[in-house]
Amino acid sequence: MRLSVIVPVYNMAAEGRLRFCLDSLINQTISDYEILAVDDASTDNSLEILREYAGTYPEKVRVLAHEVNRRQGGAKNTGLKAATGEWIGFIDSDDWVTPDYYEKLLKRAEETGADMVGCDYNLVNSHTFEVGQVVRNNSAEQTGALDRERHGKLIMRSGSMVIKIYKRQVIVDNHLDFPEGIFYEDNCAGPVWSLYFTRFERVEEPLYYYYQHQTSTVHHVSEEKCRDRMRAAQLMLRQCRERGFLEEYYPEIQYRFTELYYAVTLFSYMLGCPHRKLSFVKELGRGIREAFPDFQDNTYYRQYTDPEEQRMIALQMRSDARFFYYYGLKLWVRRWRKRLGR
């Protein structure tokens, strides 16, 4: 088997989302591949739709079903254990790909000897194959033979895992998998996985369609999701330490942890969480101080973190309460001015 495509599925039956995804996979221009659809204890009729496709396309579709929800990481792990393909791909069950998506990625791998290949993606809000807002996923500076410098860049910006294919033998040999039971599982797995691959190449086209809708994870901020992001960062750091990468890639891992565990979580929580709590902000500050007390001295932090965010973070490092109330007041003033049209 040349390729296994793993599709985690949870309650995607509405609005034809799951069918549109599956149709794009069924109609790929390659022939030697399997679709491993993993139903993660859906409460709608997603599993029935998957079984319908398996009955219609038994040579392509295999259905695996969880009795208990394990989130996307658990579904991906189930797919990995069942996969037989030389290559592994992932796709979110409300997204879709061009008919030649996997053909082009596999061709690029054959031409270059890469063991990891990616491309760019489109942001769209309807079921279409017209090119939408193109988002570049990874950069030219990260591609080629993966030396110390390129691996470091991938730790900091590993890019989306659904917009890549991976050589399965690398995954198997190094016991790579996903954290289960949390959102943002890719934020842990992406940086860790990237360190085991030897050559990364890209197809310079937006072949993947990322469907933006109101039930997407990114559209809703909650304390639970913030905590999952923190947990993903902690797991990433733990794996890097246990796998022997922390010393060699210390600045990059420190920056990625700071960004994921702390900075992104702090500002998304303050901006988007409807019922903010000072106790949570204190917990964030305490966590980053315990992990990396000198994080503000990190070269990448100084280079890539927005200057205003750096000022706000410095304020929190001096006083959690001052930051919490000052930043909250700033947001209130901004929204009040917006209402007044100023």
Image: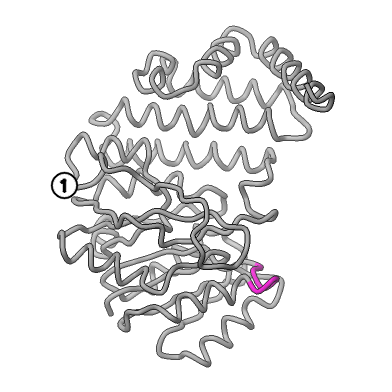
Q: Position of residue 335 (x, y in %)?
A: 78, 25
The quarter in which the C terminus is drawn is top right
List x then y, in percent, for residue 309: 55, 19
- Report the magenta residues as a range: 11-16
Callout 1, which amino acid? Ala
Q: Quadrant of the N terminus?
A: bottom left
Q: Residue at x 53, y 72 (%)?
A: 21
- The relative height of residue 127 versus residue 221 in the rendered view (above or below) is below
Q: Nearer the viewer, residue 43 or 239?
A: 43
Camera-side residue: 129 or 69?
129
Q: Is residue 286 magenta?
A: no
Quadrant housing residue 327: top right
Judging by the rendered image, the residue that carries numbered circle 1 is 145
Q: Position of residue 31 (x, y in %)?
A: 32, 84
Residue 79 horizontal/vertical position (percent): 43, 69
Q: Is residue 151 left or right of residue 89?
A: left
Query: Which residue is pictured at 64% across the width and 76% down the height?
Result: 46
Q: Tell me where residue 88 sits by quadrant.
A: bottom left
Left or right placement of residue 272 versus residue 144 in this view: right
- Residue for point 66% across, 13% down: 323
